[in-house]
Amino acid sequence: MASTKIAGRLETFRPIHLIRLLQDARVTGRLEFVRTNQRVNLFIEAGHSVFCTSSGGRLQLGEVLMRQADLRKEVLDLALALQTDFPGKRIGRILVESGSLTEAQVRDAVVALQQQVLCEVLLWRDGTFQFLEGELAAHEDVRIELDIDQL
């Protein structure tokens, strides 16, 4: 069961300072940022940022795959159509299983997308945050370390 340990407004506490605090404390949990219609969750395990999600991102994984992996739009559209037949199945998994992309191509695109989300959050100057200790990123195919010093 998760419990909120810290919460506040981004006008007072900047995202970079919160992330560094949680890294230094080597905690595990979910750091949630909320602004207007966007919610970003950064999952931290033993002080390491391992995964993030966004509810209102402008950039989608399919767009990144088309740009980075030279995925044709027709192939992406077909995979998206297949995804409606298999709710909950990730688009990257569908593309790998169909032979359209490799695991490495999907992983690279997921990393790029998460880095973009995190970079955007680091610029936020308004909104709220809360840290929910003990929450883990569940069932994620790609677990990465998001190093804020390399963004």
Image (tube, rainbow, N blue to C red):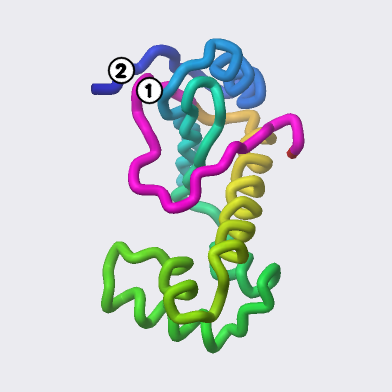
Does the magenta portion include 64? no
* Residue type highlighted by circle 2: Ser
Q: Residues within 10 Å of mark 2 (few under 14, many from 20)?
A: few
Q: Nearer the viewer, residue 126 or 151?
A: 151
List the single residue furthest toward the right. Answer: 150
Could you tell me how many numbered marks the image carries?
Answer: 2
Counting from the top left corner in percent of width and height, residue 74 is at 54, 88
Residues rendered magenta in the picture: 129-150
Counting from the top left corner in percent of width and height, residue 115 is at 65, 46
**Local secondary structure at mark 1:** strand
Q: Nearer the viewer, residue 10 or 144?
A: 144
Counting from the top left corner in percent of width and height, residue 53 is at 47, 45
Instruction: From this view, report whether residue 112 is shown above or below residue 151.
Output: below
**Which of the 4 image quadrants contains residue 12?**
top right
**Which of the 4 image quadrants contains residue 1?**
top left
Mark 2 = which residue? 3
**Local secondary structure at mark 2:** strand
Inter-mark Cα distance, 1 to 2: 5 Å
The reply to whether the C-beta atoms of the residues labelled 1 and 2 are less than 8 Å apart is yes
Q: Is residue 12 visible?
A: no
Q: Nearer the viewer, residue 24 or 40?
A: 24
Dominant secondary structure of the magenta stretch?
A: loop
Counting from the top left corner in percent of width and height, residue 136 is at 37, 33
Query: Residue sitting at 50 percent across and 42 percent down?
Result: 52
Query: Residue sitting at 59 percent across and 23 percent down?
Result: 19
Instruction: From this view, report whether residue 33 is shown above or below residue 85.
Output: above
Query: Residue sitting at 61 percent across and 84 percent down?
Result: 72
* Residue type highlighted by circle 1: Leu
List the single residue furthest toward the bottom. Answer: 74
Mark 1 = which residue? 132
Query: Residue sitting at 59 percent across and 37 percent down?
Result: 145
Does the magenta portion include 134? yes
